Image (cartoon, helix red, strand yellow):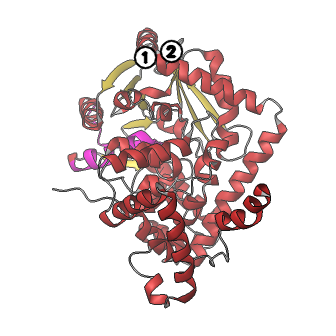
């Protein structure tokens, strides 16, 4: 079946028409961006930390096989079972086999973008295994049958009435409840019995440490600690790019992660997992799923430095005003727009164009990924691979020809200025002008710079 590209523009248009959600989403994310800036100004060594984090990540990616093998060897010494998953299907099969071996029918899990990426719930649940998200935002999204809309705050697009409606449908609570504390308590009351009776627990992870064979999970709710310890069977899923060489390197990333994500100095829980608890069992699944291929892409390999803080999303004017679900992918916002095409170039061919190219995403990235430059490079790749809609492709080709010839360009500018002042509105605002669909064209300049320079400077220079 032919894959159709995600229609980000159409989905964004729907979100733009929802004024209450649009206003809240924009203000909430911008508030996180401002808090991030406050934390940045508190630390005089902030830029040094960013540079160091970038260096560590680039060094690690350049020696990725060696560090992964070092992690595996040390993790096994610690009593951890290490598994390698080449793709999403293999990850799901491994997780399913572990659960089947332990006759587990109920799985509690904390937030994990990799399991979302692999659609693990979609694999396990038809096989009779109930999967319950324990993170508040993830649980809200699960109950509402939606993907996470943000890598850190999965339900950031929802208002309190939205959550009240979801909980009323699933927990039989008051649909008119407007107290967020009461709603959080309703989730806690519903989740605790499920957690205490679960057969297995699963977490994601923020960092793998090669030197020690350990991994670290950073959360604010403590749900990962419950998921990992209550059942005695702990499965952790991490992408292979999450590796860092030494425990000493960890401090650099811990100082940057929460400050960049939420504007808080550190997460409430930074848990180090060194091995299974007494009488228990611990499994780590290392997931590739296209990461090795991305590592070999000259223009895009540094996207693997990402630590999933969401800072680029919080600052992006397009993401803030279109909502994460409009991207149609697990990873949204600027980072998603450069990651997603590596998973499916055609399906996500529209996402690199969902940007103003203002560079703010690059400026706030704690590991200094050149996000806006990669967005531009993806546009070039997609054009070369003919993954751009026909109308846009033809308009760009026409524009390229005109701009490549100064005489044609100046003639086009003069005729455009005349057209803007005289043509009827229907001739200017139509399907050939998608830019003007939700915005007014700027007024025409009375005079081009070239003609002004010719009149005012060239004459003087000749004299």
- Residue at the farthest left position: 1
Query: Can you say which quadrant of the picture contains the N terminus?
Result: bottom left
Q: Position of residue 184 (x, y in %)?
A: 59, 59
Image quarter of residue 450? bottom right
Any magenta on residue 216?
no
First in sequence: mark 1 or mark 2? 1
Q: Position of residue 103 (x, y in %)?
A: 25, 35
- Residue at the farthest front position: 463
Q: Would residue 141 be visible to someone looking at this image?
A: yes
Tag 1–tag 2 contact (CB < 8 Å): yes
Q: CA distance from mark 1 to mark 2?
A: 7 Å
SS category of the residue bearing label 2? loop
- In the foreground, 406 or 392: 406
Q: Would residue 234 be visible to someone looking at this image?
A: no
Q: 189 left or right of 146?
A: right
| Tag of residue 68 | 1
10 Å crowding of disc 1: few (<14), some (14-19), many (20+) = many
| Tag of residue 210 | 2
Query: Can you say which quadrant of the picture contains the C terminus?
Result: bottom right
């Amino acid at each position: 079946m032919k894959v159709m590209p995600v229609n980000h523009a159409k989905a964004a248009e729907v979100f733009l028409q929802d004024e209450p959600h649009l206003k809240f989403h924009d203000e909430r994310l911008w508030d996180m961006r401002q808090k991030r800036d406050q934390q940045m100004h508190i630390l005089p060594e902030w830029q040094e930390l960013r540079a160091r984090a970038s260096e560590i990540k680039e060094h690690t990616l350049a020696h990725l096989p060696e560090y992964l093998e070092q992690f595996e060897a040390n993790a096994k010494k610690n009593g951890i079972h290490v598994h390698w998953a080449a793709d999403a299907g293999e990850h799901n099969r491994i997780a399913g086999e572990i659960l089947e071996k332990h006759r587990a029918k109920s799985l509690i899990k904390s937030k994990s973008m990799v399991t979302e990426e692999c659609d693990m719930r979609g694999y396990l649940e038809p096989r009779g295994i109930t999967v319950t998200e324990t993170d508040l935002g993830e649980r809200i999204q699960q109950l509402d049958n939606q993907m996470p809309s943000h890598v850190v705050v999965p339900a950031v697009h929802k208002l309190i009435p939205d959550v009240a409606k979801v909980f009323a449908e699933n927990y039989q609570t008051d649909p008119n409840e407007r107290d967020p504390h009461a709603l959080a308590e309703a989730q806690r009351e519903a989740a605790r019995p499920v957690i205490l009776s679960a057969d297995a627990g699963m977490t994601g992870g923020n960092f793998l440490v090669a030197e020690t064979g350990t991994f670290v999970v950073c959360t604010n709710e403590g749900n990962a600690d419950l998921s990992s310890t209550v059942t005695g069977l702990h499965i952790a899923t991490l992408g292979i790019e999450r590796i860092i060489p030494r425990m000493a390197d960890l401090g650099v990333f811990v100082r940057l992660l929460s400050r960049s994500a939420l504007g808080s100095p550190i997460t409430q829980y930074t848990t180090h997992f060194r091995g299974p608890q007494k009488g228990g069992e611990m499994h780590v699944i290392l997931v590739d799923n296209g990461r090795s291929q991305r590592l070999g892409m000259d223009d895009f390999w540094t996207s693997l430095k990402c630590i999933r803080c969401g800072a680029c999303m919080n600052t992006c004017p397009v993401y803030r005003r279109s909502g994460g679900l409009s991207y149609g992918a697990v990873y949204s916002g600027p980072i998603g727009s450069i990651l997603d095409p590596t998973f499916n170039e055609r399906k996500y061919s529209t996402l690199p164009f969902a940007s103003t190219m203002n560079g703010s995403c690059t400026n706030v990235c704690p590991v200094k990924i050149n996000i806006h430059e990669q967005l531009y490079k993806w546009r070039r790749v997609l054009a070369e691979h003919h993954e751009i809609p026909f109308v846009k492709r033809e308009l760009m080709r026409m524009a390229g020809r005109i701009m490549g010839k100064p005489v044609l360009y100046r003639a086009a500018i003069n005729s455009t200025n005349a057209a803007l002042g005289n043509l009827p509105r229907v001739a200017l605002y139509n399907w050939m002008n998608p830019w003007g669909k939700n915005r007014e064209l700027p007024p025409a300049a009375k005079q081009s710079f070239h003609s002004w320079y010719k009149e005012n400077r060239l004459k003087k220079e000749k004299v």
